[in-house]
Structure formats: C-alpha cells, structure tokens
Amino acid sequence: MSESPLIIALDYPSLDAALCMADQLDPARCRLKVGKELYTRSGPAVLEALHGRGFEVFLDLKFHDIPNTVAGAVQAAAEQGVWMVNVHAGGGRKMMEAAAERLEKNGLATHLIAVTVLTSLQESDLQEVGLSCTPAEQVERLARLTQQSGLQGVVCSAQEAAHLKTICGDSFLKVTPGIRPSFAAVNDQQRIMTPSKAIQAGSTHLVIGRPVTQAADPMEALTAIEAELA
Ligand SMILES: O=c1ccn([C@@H]2O[C@H](COP(=O)(O)O)[C@@H](O)[C@H]2O)c(=O)[nH]1
C-alpha cells in the first residue's frame, strides 16, 4: 500500500503502452489511475496486470446512469479489486446512495467517490449547460450531496480543496486532477494548481497524468514532483 498522495493517470491507447510506463514506476511511490480510454481498449486485463505488479488502482470510469445500473457497475469494479472507483455526483442522491449501499451490502471496501465539476470546466462552460453559478459554488453543492449520500470523498480541483476541508472535514477525500508543476503545460485543464500548493490547500490525493507520462524523462518529472512535496 502506497502512503504517497500521488496517483499517476495511465491515459494510454494500449495495454502495452500503459504497462511500459507502469514498469518504470514503483507501487511504494504512487498509485495508478485507469480511465476510459485504457479500460475501453484493454478491459479487466489491465487491472489484473497492475494488481499483479503490486499497484493500487483508481478505476476512473465516472459512472452516471440510473441507480440500479450504477450500483451494478460499482459492484463489478469493486469485485475486480480496485482501490477506488467513482461516479458523477450529477447522477443525484438516489444514484449515489444505491452505489454506496451496494458496496456496503457486499462487504466491499473499495473507496467510492464522486466527480463534482470537471477540472477542464470554467464558469462559462457551466453557463452553457444551464448552471448559473461558479465552479466553486457547484463543487460545494455536489460535495455536500456526496457526503450526505454516504460516499467517502470527491473529485474536485485543488482550488476548491481548502473550502471543502472546512465544510466536509479532513477525512473526506479530496482527489484533485488538474495538477500542474511549474515545468508542465496546462493542456486542456482550466482549474489548476501546483503539487505543493494543492497539498497545502487540503488535497488528499493528486492525480497527475501528462506532466509525468508525456515528459521527456517521466522518472525525472516524478522525482521533481516528489521533491516539491518533501
Ligand atoms: O475533473 C477531472 C476528473 C478527472 N480527470 C482525469 O485526471 C487525469 C488528468 O490528467 P492530466 O494529463 O494530468 O491532465 C485524466 O485522466 C482525466 O481524465 C481530470 O483531469 N479532471
């Protein structure tokens, strides 16, 4: 089990490419995240391969459907032994409660968290989908709903972590993508923060993809991030 807050996102188009990166990493230094592209390409085989190498895995499929469907999907993920799985908080209270209850009923210890507002979105994007509020306001609303629904935490940006720490507590997980070390490109992220500032703000886990996986020397990038956090 890793004590590190780092979760490296394996956003690759093939199992071979993902394992090539995983084989350079150390399960004592990070956890790994498997998302939609890699899981759609490789299926459960990627989880078996990463678990076999000793990694804890966050299966980031962001389930969003009717309660019965999401509960079944979350159970299926947990039965594959993943450390963490997620749903979209926008699926609502009944959906989140059904998912949490399914894990509880089956004695599955996988962490269940909910995505609040994607880190690639800013206020104008929310306006376009009919939400007349800031990302911070929507994150607060969905984090409160997530906690009331019995989940262990949220995906949010590090920019919201300090406020969520105040209203939801220290033990409520704040898993934050959109992490950008000073040396990295912003890419398609909007609500970003550096690794050290994110931890200071109250992020419990930092999700980092391209700043490591697309770096000229991924291990050098990872070591620089660890040094920033030390
Ligand atoms: O709000 C969210 C939710 C999930 N993600 C995922 O995190 C990683 C970030 O990768 P980078 O290369 O560091 O940008 C990626 O897998 C996303 O699907 C997110 O970015 N924001």
Image (spheres, rainbow, N blue to C red):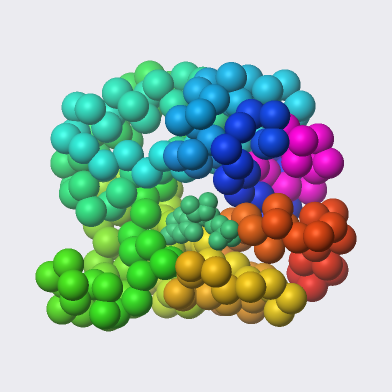
Is residue 222 shown to the viewer in this render? no
Q: Residue at x 53, y 75 (%)?
A: 192
Side of 129 where 199 appears, left or right: right
Q: Is residue 3 above or below residue 142?
A: above
Among all residues in the image, which is located at the extreme left? 130
Numbered range of the magenta stretch: 19-32
Q: Is residue 13 visible?
A: yes
Viewer-proximal residue, 169 or 98?
Answer: 98
In the image, residue 109 lies in the stretch drawn in magenta = no
> Residue at horizontal 69%, vertical 72%?
184
Residue occupying the point 80% across, 55% down: 218
Q: Tally the numbered discs.
A: 0
153 left or right, relative to 230: left
Please tell me in which quadrant of the rendered image residue 194 appears: bottom right
x 58%, y 19%: residue: 45
Q: Is residue 27 magenta?
A: yes
